[in-house]
Amino acid sequence: SASTLGLHDGHVWETLQQLVTSQPTMSVHLVHPCLAAFLLGDLDFFDLRGLGLGLLSPQVHASQVACIFAARGHWALIWATRHHRHYVWSYHDGIFDHIRDEAHQLAMKLTGLFGGDTMDFHISHLLRQRSPTTCGTVALFHVCFRLGLCGLPSDEMILGLHEHLLAS
């Protein structure tokens, strides 16, 4: 959960950037968790000022979009493949369908923000969350898997990365 024992948006954003830059063969546009929170109505525009215009840019030149977002105290991933102005979104959540409505709403808003005309939305749960506070770490492993950087991790790997991120 996005609580005191779970990851915060700084952990998620820094790790997301590191994962994507470690896979230079893929073109991935990253959506900041704060922009996602704003689009879901959980953050005021005033709170976005420190992000910088580059992170708020609706210009998407990449073929993929990654957005780890929090809703109702829980992190999940939506990932899109862009085909010109059509976006195909996949929703990945360690607690299956827990925030599906928010994921769908966010996918629609991001498609519009990025100038998309149409979208598809698919549910694609790959990895089950077994510990109550590791949802952010599970979302990051979903990104790792989508990037082709790892297979599906064991529960021990998830807990190990989670503890490492909390300690950093």
Image: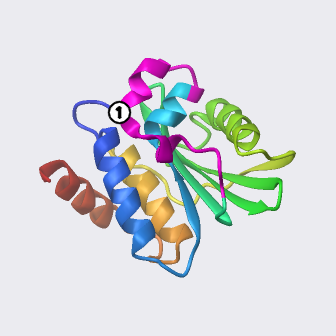
Total marks drawn? 1
**What residue occupies the far bottom of the structure in this picture?**
25
> Looking at the image, which residue is at 87% across and 46% down?
118
Residue extent of the magenta highlight: 39-60
Q: Position of residue 32 (x, y in %)?
A: 46, 44
**Residue in the foreground of this view, choosing between 146 and 54:** 54
**What residue occupies the far left of the structure in this picture?**
167
Q: Kindly tell me whether residue 51 is visible in this rendering.
A: yes
Side of 84 relative to 1 (left or right)? right
Does residue 94 sit above or below 49 in this rendering? below
Does residue 145 sit above or below 52 in this rendering? below
Residues packed near mark 1 inside 10 Å, few (<14), some (14 to 19) or many (20 plus): few
Side of 149 relative to 98 (left or right)? left
Side of 132 relative to 91 (left or right)? left
Q: Position of residue 98 (x, y in %)?
A: 57, 35
Q: Is residue 58 magenta?
A: yes
| Residue under pointer 1 | 50
> Looking at the image, which residue is at 59% across and 70% down?
27
**Residue in the foreground of this view, choosing between 49 and 37:** 49
Q: Kindly tell me whether residue 1 is visible in this rendering.
A: no
On the image, which quarter does residue 135 sit in?
top left
Q: Could you say whether the residue bearing mark 1 is in a helix, strand or loop?
A: helix
At label 1, the amino acid type is Gly
Q: Position of residue 64 (x, y in %)?
A: 64, 63
Q: Position of residue 97 (x, y in %)?
A: 62, 39
Side of 145 relative to 11 (left or right)? right
Does residue 133 sit above or below 24 in this rendering? above
Quadrant in which the N terminus appears = top left
> Looking at the image, which residue is at 57% across and 75% down?
26
